[in-house]
Amino acid sequence: MKKALYNPISNDFSVTYDINGDGHPLKFVAPSMTISYFEEPIFSHVRKHLLDHILNVRNLNPTIPANRESIEKEVDVEI
């Protein structure tokens, strides 16, 4: 089952992931201001890196749990 993820930033976000374990990572994109759908484990990988990217872009300290939780509320989509 696919899970939904919202990219709240003004730029498309892309990340690579070697889902097949063959040394040839695939590129996954979460378009700007759009809800995207991914299967596990791709969803978890994209979500983690998107959260980290948003924290960096907004100059928020990633070691403060409240900062990450705030971003998670923006990114996570309930279906």
Image (cartoon, rainbow, N blue to C red):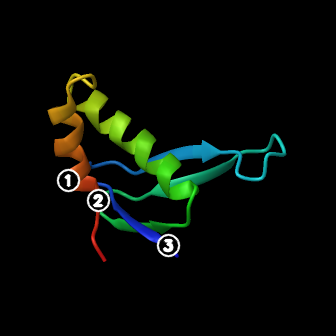
The residue beneath circle 3 is 2
**Residue 34 visible:** yes
Q: What amino acid is labelled 1 in the image?
A: Lys
Above or below residue 67? Residue 22 is: below
Q: Residues within 10 Å of mark 3 (few under 14, many from 20)?
A: few
Q: Earlier in the sequence, mark 2 or mark 3?
A: 3
Please, what is the three-letter code of the amino acid marked with disc 2?
Answer: Asp
In the picture of the structure, the residue carrying the numbered disc 2 is 76
Q: Nearer the viewer, residue 5 or 33?
A: 5
**Residue 57: percent from left, percent from top:** 27, 31
Q: Spatial distance from mark 2 to mark 3, Cα to Cα?
A: 13 Å
**What residue is at 49 percent from the left and 72 percent from the top?**
2
Looking at the rendered structure, the secondary structure element under dot 3 is: loop
Please identify the quarter of the rendering in which residue 64 is found.
Answer: top left
**First in sequence: mark 3 vs mark 1:** 3
Q: What residue did someone put label 1 on?
A: 73
Label 2 element class: loop
Question: Residue 70 placed where, x, y %?
Answer: 16, 44
Mark 2–mark 1 CB contact (< 8 Å): yes
